[in-house]
Amino acid sequence: MPDAIFDHPRLAAIYDPLDPVRDDLDVYVGIADELGARSVLDIGCGTGTFALMLAARGIDVTAVDPAAGSLDVARVKPGAARVRWIHGDASDLPAMRVDLATMTANVAQAIVEPALWAHTLRGAHNALRPGGHLVFETRIAARKAWLSWNRAESYRVSDIDGVGAVENWVELLDVSLPLVTFRSTYVFASDGQTLTSESTLRFRERDEIEADLAAHGYTVEEVRDAPDRPGREYVFLARTNL
């Protein structure tokens, strides 16, 4: 089941206003250009920001996400008709042969269960043309990103058009590596409603990921440093075997 932050209608509607600067996606746009990708599968597309960035560049985009609330937001954005939106996940996709499959932001880490991770890698492989690429990112566990996931460091109040003031913060609930669980809280000033969303991320080690990719028919071409989080995050570029 998708986390409430992505699926609850009221939370999905404020996801973009709470995180309006998405320069973390620039690296993926750059990689799509670098690889000459003309067709892309965006796995875990969320509210569609990246899918729409690609579609605006003339790329054929299929975007899939299990959170209906996020897709509802994506489908009414300007340019949404250029994208093929699918409610589901990468384990059950229609036949396609794309140049590039992506998992941006926390998507790869949010696929916690090993069986679903295997299904995702297999599904992406099936969707890619021979020699196509899978690109995704994951935080480096040794950097302990979760140490800053607390109310004192994350609390903020945002004034959102048409919504009003929204307080939000994050609280760490459990660290049982490779799993880290946290709770996000949102308080709407307009009516006092408080909504929470619990999330778990899996912090896979680099060698584990490389082994998983090899087991599912990929060759790791490069592991890059994430430009928006230097030294804290890997970006994997893997190619399907010919």
Image (cartoon, rainbow, N blue to C red):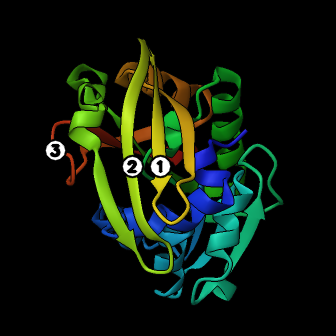
Residue 60: which quarter of the image? bottom right
As helix, strand or loop, the secondary structure at mark 2 comes to strand
As helix, strand or loop, the secondary structure at mark 1 comes to strand
Q: Is residue 205 depicted above or below 186 in this figure? A: above
Q: In front: 79, or 100?
A: 79
Q: Amino acid at mark 2?
A: Asn
Q: Residue at x 26, y 45 (%)?
A: 224
Labels 3 and 1: the sequence-earlier one: 1
On the image, the x and y values in percent for residue 91 come to 76, 43
As helix, strand or loop, the secondary structure at mark 3 comes to loop
Left or right of residue 112: residue 187:
left
> Label 3: which residue?
230
Q: Which mark is residue 168?
A: 2
> Label 1: which residue?
186
Q: Residue at x 62, y 61 (%)?
A: 10
Left or right of residue 92: residue 25:
left
